[in-house]
Amino acid sequence: PISKGSKAMNLAVIGAGYVGLVTGACLADVGNRVHCVDRDAARLHLLRGGHLPIYEPGLDTLVARNAAAGRLVFTDDLPAAVADADAVFIAVGTPSREDGAADIGQVLQAAGDVARSATRDLLVVVKSTVPVGTCDRVREVVEAELARRGAPCELRVASNPEFLKEGHAVEDFQRPDRIVIGTSDDDDGALLRALYAPYNRNHDRLICMDIRSAEFTKYASNAMLAARISLMNELACLAEKVDADIESVRRGTGADPRIGYDFLYAGAGYGGSCLPKDVRALIRLADEYGAAADILGSVQAVNLRQRTLLYEKLERFFRGRLAGRTIAVWGLAFKPATDDIREAPSIDLIGRLLRAGASVRGYDPVAGANALRALGQDGFSIADDARAACRGADALVVMTEWREFKSPDFRGLAQTLRARAVFDARNLYDPAYVRSCGLHYEGVGRAAGR
Ligand code: NAD
C-alpha cells in the first residue's frame, strides 16, 4: 500500500558528498530533522558557512532553506548525531581498490562508529553502492561492537541503494523512478516506507526485496547502462569504417520502444564516479564467486579503447606532432550540470595531450577549479569563458555537452582556431554546417565525408 503520510523522524546521514548531502537536504525538506555527518573539516566549514562543497542544481536553496529552519545540521560529532536518531544512512564513498573490487572500508568504519555510540534502537541504512554481502558484514561489525560495549540496544541493517544522477540529483531524489528497499524485516520496511511516503504519493515506487538482491540491483543497473554505452561506442567505430553516420543510426534505432532513445549516445567513453568503478567491482565480484563476466569484461575493454579515441583523432590530424600545439577543451566535468571530474574522459584526454607536449586551455561552466586541482598548472590553464579558451588555440575539442556549447559561432571559430579544426566528442553539431563555416570537423562514428 502507498503510505498516506508519516511523522517527522530524527535522521543522521554519514557522508556529506553528492549522495549524502542530497539525501540529507531532501529528507529535511519534507520535515525530518537531519544531522549530516562528515569527517572532512574543510567540507563542514564550507557547509556551515552557507556554501556548498559541490555543484548540484537546486541544492543550494534546499540546503539554505533547511539549515535556516534548523532541520539540517552539519557536524563531525557522530555520537551526538546518532543519539536520538530513528535511522542512520551511510552514504560514504566506496572507491575502487587497486584490484578493482569496491573498498567498503569507509562503510564498515561508519557502521562501527554508529555502533560505538548508539544509545537506542535504530535502523542502519546502507545507501552507498556496495557489493553483495556488505550489509551482512555491516551487521557483523555492528553486533561485535554492541556486544563489546554490552550496549542494551538493537541496531538493524537495511539496504537502500541510491539511483540519483549527478546534475539531476535533487529532482531524482524528489521524483524517483523507483526506491529500492532491501530488508526482510516488516518493521524496518514500514519505517522506510513511511520515510519515503512524501515521494511515493502518485503511485507505488517502492520495490522491496531481500538485502542481497537490493545490493545487486544497483550494480545490475549500472552494468546495463555501461553496456549500452559501450555497445553504442563499438557500433560508432564500425559506422566510421563503413561510412555510415551513427547519429542517423541512433535516431533510427532508438525509435523502437524496446530500445528507446535514452542513454544511446556514442562519445568519449563512460566516466564519472560510478559506472567505471561499479563495472570493475562487479567483474571482481564475479571473479570471487567463479562466475563468468564476459560481457562486462568487453564493456570495460571497449570503454578503455574509446577513451583514447579523441586523442588518436587529434594525433592523426596533427600528423603525430602535438608538441607545441595548443588545444582548447570545452567541458571538463564528466557530464553536464555537475562539477564532478572523477574518471572524466576530458581529464584523461588532457593528461595525454600534456604528456605529448601540447598545451591545453580548458573551459567548463563549473568544473574548472576541480580540473586545475587534478591536472596541475603545467601546460594547462583555465579560461574564463568558451571563446577565451579558443584564443590562440590550434583546435577545439568539445568533451561535455553543456547547453552553452550547443550552438557556437562557427564562423568566429574558423577565424580564431589556427588549424581550423573542431573535434566533437558528443556529436553535438551538424558536420555539414560546421564544414561549411570553413572548419575541419570530426565527431564520433561519423564518416569523414559527412
Ligand atoms: P563523495 O565522495 O562525494 O562523498 C563521500 C563523503 O563521505 C565525503 O565527504 C567523505 O568525507 C565522507 N566520509 C567518508 N567516510 C566517512 C566517515 N567514516 N565518517 C564521516 N564521513 C565520512 O561520494 P558520493 O559520490 O556521494 O558517493 C557515495 C556513495 O554513493 C558511493 O558508494 C557511490 O558509489 C554511491 N552513489 C553515488 C552516486 C553519485 O552520482 N555520486 C549515485 C548513486 C550512488
Image: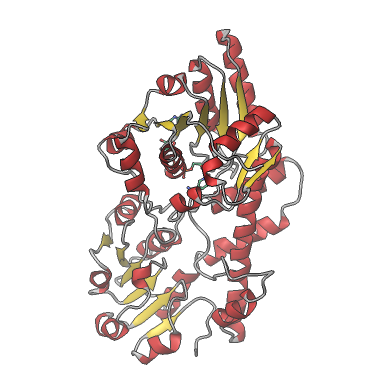
| Camera-nearest residue between 399 and 401 | 401
Residue ranking furthest to the top: 150
**Residue displayed at 67% across by 71% down:** 257
- In the picture, residue 348 is in which quadrant? bottom left
Q: Residue 317: image x %, image y %?
A: 42, 80
Can you say whether 307 is above or below 141 in the image? below
Q: Residue 212: image x %, image y %?
A: 70, 38
Can you say whether 175 is above or below 236 in the image? above
Q: Residue 97: image x %, image y %?
A: 55, 40
Residue 63 is left or right of residue 385, and the answer is: right
Can you say whether 407 is above or below 50 in the image? below
Q: Residue 75: image x %, image y %?
A: 36, 28
| Camera-nearest residue between 258 and 326 | 258
How is the protein colored in the picture? Answer: secondary structure
Q: Is residue 207 visible?
A: yes
Q: Which quarter of the figure is the N terminus placed in?
A: top right
Residue 105 is left or right of residue 297, and the answer is: left
| Camera-nearest residue between 308 and 220 | 220
**Residue displayed at 33% across by 70% down:** 404
Q: Is residue 323 visible?
A: no
- In the picture, residue 190 is in which quadrant? top right
**Residue displayed at 30% across by 54% down:** 372
Q: How many marks?
A: 0
